[in-house]
Amino acid sequence: MTRMTTRPENVHQERLLRLLRDEGPRSRAELGDVVHLSRSKLAVEIDRLVELGLVEPAGLAASRGGRRSSIVRLAARLRVVAIDIGATSIDVAVTNGELEILGHVAMACNVREGPDVVLERALDLLGKLRGEGLADEIHGVGIGVPGPVSFREGMPVVPPIMPGWDRYPVREAVSQRLGCPVLVDNDVNIMALGELHAGLARSVEDFLLLKIGTGVGCGIVVDGKVYRGMSGSAGDIGHIQVDEDGPTCVCGNVGCLEATFSGAALARDAVTEARAGRSPFLADRLEEAGELTALDVAAAVAAGDPTALRLVREGGRRVGNVLAGLISFFNPGLVVIAGGVAGLGHILLAEIRSVVYRRSPPLATGNLPIVLSELKNTAGVIGATRLISDHIFAAT
Amino acid sequence: MTRMTTRPENVHQERLLRLLRDEGPRSRAELGDVVHLSRSKLAVEIDRLVELGLVEPAGLAASRGGRRSSIVRLAARLRVVAIDIGATSIDVAVTNGELEILGHVAMACNVREGPDVVLERALDLLGKLRGEGLADEIHGVGIGVPGPVSFREGMPVVPPIMPGWDRYPVREAVSQRLGCPVLVDNDVNIMALGELHAGLARSVEDFLLLKIGTGVGCGIVVDGKVYRGMSGSAGDIGHIQVDEDGPTCVCGNVGCLEATFSGAALARDAVTEARAGRSPFLADRLEEAGELTALDVAAAVAAGDPTALRLVREGGRRVGNVLAGLISFFNPGLVVIAGGVAGLGHILLAEIRSVVYRRSPPLATGNLPIVLSELKNTAGVIGATRLISDHIFAAT
């Protein structure tokens, strides 16, 4: 495997690389309009990026009245890899320098099998993509994991659903195997970066990504960068108390948001309702499958089942109350809702919105869109490549 | 009045000015150790700052083995002004370039009298300090007001307790009168900057300043800078719902934090308890003064009054619950508690800590100090001078 260590040498080169990544091929004249360098200085920096193999010529632009300007683009050989490890799945994707997905494979895999097994499977998946000729050289790898991460050290820290991963040196292990830079972050931060790069948050500096999946978490973006907090646990909102008399949570406290409304809590409540005879629809499904998931609740809602509708509405109200508080505190420019339970769609969204717009200060909600993610299952992998791309395109 | 428009010309000069402001006089050799400029380049920048009148020589340093290095300091003539407008008071202070207070005057003044009256009184107070020769030239003015501010526009926006101030151009008005740069922010952000500059948050990049006064608000510092959010309302946590069956708030919702525990709420509850005969101590005070304040509750607590103790403990629990959520979300490196009600001291602090350490994730609270401010009534004025100083010491 080839080690690629080329990095931009100064902030001008960094700026040019990010522009070409986010906006695509550009003529030298267009780049000059944006970076405010003299024509000769710009030429020096672009020529240097070509020498470094990070940028390449891509023909001539249409004339703007004089000599035609030549177009440059990120080198076509650049490859960035995403490894998105979920609670029960692994996604691996390869992108070009512009972070466009060239190949994406996924498999079921329980993160509880531990780092040796799970990382080996991830590398196998990557090997498959490389076997198809998709990634001869790898410029960098971004990894997401479903738990708290010490970003600085590149390792999970006391992750509740990842036995065996505590302080396992994920970044070092993968970096040594692949011979390239690697960064590790938690899955929610990765999704937030995906929304920032390719989702509804593209032009928003300060926003929140609320993920409601098996658990509940929040990605925080400040000034276009993920905010991780003092010890990397920022956004860990699943254990905010929403009900003093609520159900006991796995964390030992009572009435945590996650224990009250999440994929897992919804499935639990659906089983209770089915067994109590309050929903023939859910009871039928339970008998067929032996268990219920958030998807069954979504189906019940679609079929007009009033009990399922009540569960989603009550959940939306809980989430909305927490979100209203966070919006008062953080005054974001956008809230994106994602994760499996977000698949419940507009009924959930309507309930969340109604609570937030009633409870948060008008100054904070006046221009605040609350939307469902449109990225579906690609937010994680795009975000992981964005994470490592920001790193390798940073001036050393 | 003299207009001083001198600003640093580049980031090196900016860095040097901030170092001299925050660390005091330094030898050229010491400055060279910190800013990583070549000896000759450093000399050029310092000489230029001397020419601009921002820096001046201050003798020779002790020898470090060779020729003695000359000491420089911020120009002694630099003057920065703070105007801290509270709900019922105005504080005006003049500092030197190092933001050390040279003069500080205050008067009672109700902000409801409107901007014309209040700003005139503030300028009168400043005139008094100038009459003592404390500020011949003014380099800049930082202003704090008790309500939401559009920082970009330098004006209050729909401030609930400031009738007549909505969109009043405070920054422009004062800047025109004094002929120098002016910035306006809300009082809680100003206090957070005070803690960052001179308080317990001096070396902390990410922290929260929780102010519990007549109302409740939060200052958020990210990466050493005040985070203001999309529309400047970040930290406006007084209306987070803490009790679905709580008292009705002035904002129209029920059970807001501020309606449940704040200086105003505490005074209201103390009167209720006194009238219901549940606290002879408070009843005596009420009869004497005709009203009760948070100070009376503090006195009752000090005298061992169990009803007052209960009020403070219940309030601490409410605040602690909200703070626990914010800590889960924001993962700060420090929480500083300030404001009038913080004067209730360690009983309140103990209750808040006990809730937070029980309810927030261990990763977020492991190394998290929660402390009472030690700045007392100077946080606001120091923060206001820091605000404008950061601006005038920024390279243009």
Image: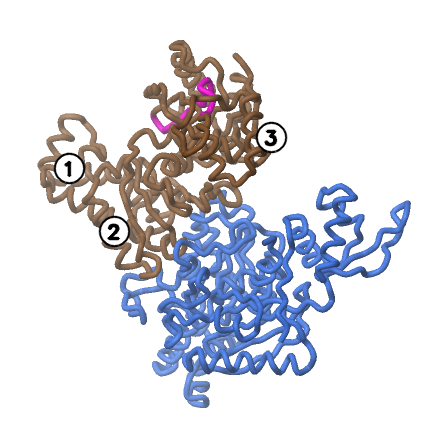
Chain colours: A blue, B brown
Amino acid type at circle 1 is Arg
- The mark found on residue B9 in the picture is 3
Quadrant location of the N terminus of chain A?
bottom right
Q: Whole-percent x and y of residue B167? A: 53, 30
- Identify residue type, mark 3: Glu
Q: Is residue A8 above or below residue A304?
A: above
* Pointer 1 with pointer 2, Cβ within 8 A: no
Q: Secondary structure at mark 2?
A: helix
Please provide the residue range marked out in magenta.
B73-88
Q: Secondary structure at mark 1?
A: helix
Foreground tag (1 vs 2): 2
Q: Quadrant of residue A249?
A: bottom left
Q: Which residue has dot 2 on it?
A: B353
Q: Is residue B21 above or below residue A131?
A: above
Which amino acid does the dot numbered 2 rest on? Answer: Arg
Report in which chain the residue with disc 2 lies.
Answer: B
Which residue, as the protein is rendered here, is positioned at the far front?
B66
Q: Is residue A310 visible?
A: no
